[in-house]
Amino acid sequence: MDVRSVKLNVLFSTDFIKYPLTGIGRYAFELAHELQQREEKVALTWLHGKKMRDSLAVASESSQSIQSVKRKLQNSKTVS
């Protein structure tokens, strides 16, 4: 058996990859990205919560919803 031809099976939790990417979330995202680049040597399974996936879900910041919440809070008389 040639060790170079064996794929490493990796189960990667994506629970920490949340926007805005800071700290451990940034590290996890960068690590996941690099592992994807090595598909010939690594068999990846992604775990998100209780769901297993074959591909990394593309996370994006929902800026429209975040901005609308910020705007509502700024205009709220209860908060000010």
Image (spheres, rainbow, N blue to C red):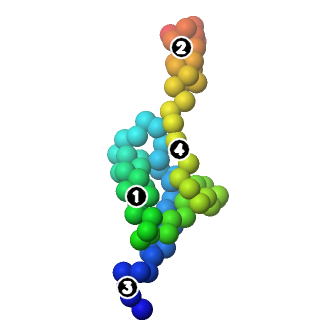
* Mark carried by residue 3: 3
Relative horizontal placement of residue 5, taking residue 13 as reference (left or right): left
Q: Mark 4 sits on what residue?
A: 58
Disc 1 from disc 4: Cα separation: 15 Å
Residue 4 appears in view = yes
Mark 3 element type: helix
Instruction: Verify CB contact (< 8 Å) between mark 1 and mark 2.
Output: no
* Residue sitting at x 44%, y 58%: 36
Closer to the chain start, of discs 3 and 2, is 3
Disc 3 from disc 2: Cα separation: 57 Å
Which circle, 4 or 3, is nearer the viewer?
3
* Residue sitting at x 42%, y 92%: 1
Disc 4 from disc 3: Cα separation: 32 Å
Q: Nearer the viewer, residue 6 or 22?
A: 6
Q: Mark 1 sits on what residue?
A: 37
Instruction: Verify CB contact (< 8 Å) between mark 3 and mark 2.
Output: no
Closer to the chain start, of discs 1 and 4, is 1
Mark 1 element type: loop
Please tell me how many numbered marks the rendered image carries. 4
Q: Quadrant of residue 54?
A: bottom right
Instruction: Verify CB contact (< 8 Å) between mark 1 and mark 4.
Output: no
Amino acid type of the residue tagged 1 in the rendering:
Gln
* Mark carried by residue 71: 2
Disc 4 from disc 2: Cα separation: 26 Å
Residue 47 appears in view = no
Q: Is residue 7 above or below residue 47?
A: below
* Residue sitting at x 56%, y 22%: 64
